[in-house]
Amino acid sequence: MASMTLEDLSSRLKKIDFCMLSTNAGSGRIASRPMSNNGDVEYDGDSWFFSYENSRKIAEIKGSEIVSLTFTAPPSLLGKPGIFIAIEGIASLVRDKAAFEKHWVADLDRWFPGGIDTPGIVLIKISASSIRYWDGEENGEVTLAGSDPRS
């Protein structure tokens, strides 16, 4: 198995805007929906997404904080295979305006017209517990600081 570092992964994630966020929807169901990283691409093991507090995904996260993210990038124009990245993590809800400011980009005004003062806005932080990748040439697991990839 090859060994991609978190820095290597971050450079690949910079080119991928959308991912699928999957949550436990209860009764043995999994719910998935597209989410944008909004250009917040200096990946360090945490992913950040804005949402509305009253959305179904927030209710599902409150019920079970274990979530997954899947990213995919198409093959390059030169024929190099794309990459698939699967991240399992723990979601937490952040309501701190300083954190909102840190992760805010102007494009978010489309969905949150009041900016960081939009009523009911919440920031979802997903801290990775495991990261696996496949890129057509190699596959492996990224080792996170303080984690044991065998667990």
Image (tube, rainbow, N blue to C red):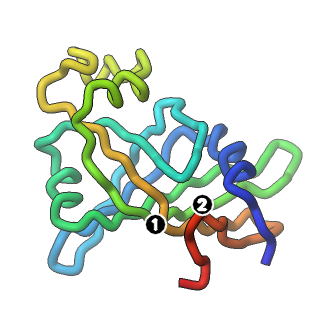
Task: Residue at 65%, 50% (x, y): give it.
Answer: 73
Return the x and y of residue 146 as percentages of the image width and height.
56, 67
How far is the residue under mark 2 from the one under mark 1? 10 Å
Q: Quadrant of the N terminus?
A: bottom right
Numbered tag placed on residue 85 in the rendering: 2
Task: Residue at 48%, 49% (x, y): give it.
Answer: 46
Q: Could you say which quadrant of the image residue 53 lies in?
A: top left
**Dot 2 alpha-carbon crowd within 10 angstroms: few under 14, some 14 to 19, many 20 or more:** many
26 or 126: nearer the eye?
A: 126
- Residue at the far right: name it: 78
Query: Is 106 placed above or below 96 here?
Result: above
Return the x and y of residue 19 as percentages of the image width and height.
48, 49
**Type of amino acid at the residue the image marks with label 1:** Glu
Task: Residue at 38%, 55% (x, y): give it.
Answer: 21
**Dot 1 alpha-carbon crowd within 10 angstroms: few under 14, some 14 to 19, many 20 or more:** some
Task: Residue at 11%, 43% (x, y): give it.
Answer: 54
Q: Secondary structure at mark 2?
A: strand
Q: Secondary structure at mark 1?
A: strand
Numbered tag placed on residue 88 in the rendering: 1
The answer to whether the residues at label 2 and label 1 have Cβ atoms under 8 Å apart is no
7 or 74: nearer the eye?
A: 7
Return the x and y of residue 35 as percentages of the image width and height.
40, 44
92 with respect to 44 (left or right): left
**Type of amino acid at the residue the image marks with label 2:** Ile
Numbered tag placed on residue 59 in the rendering: none
2 with respect to 109 (left or right): right
Q: Nearer the viewer, mark 2 or mark 1?
A: 1
Return the x and y of residue 103 as percentages of the image width and height.
42, 29
- Residue at the far bottom: name it: 150
Query: Is 22 placed above or below 30 here?
Result: above
**How many numbered tags mark residues here?**
2
4 with respect to 126 (left or right): right
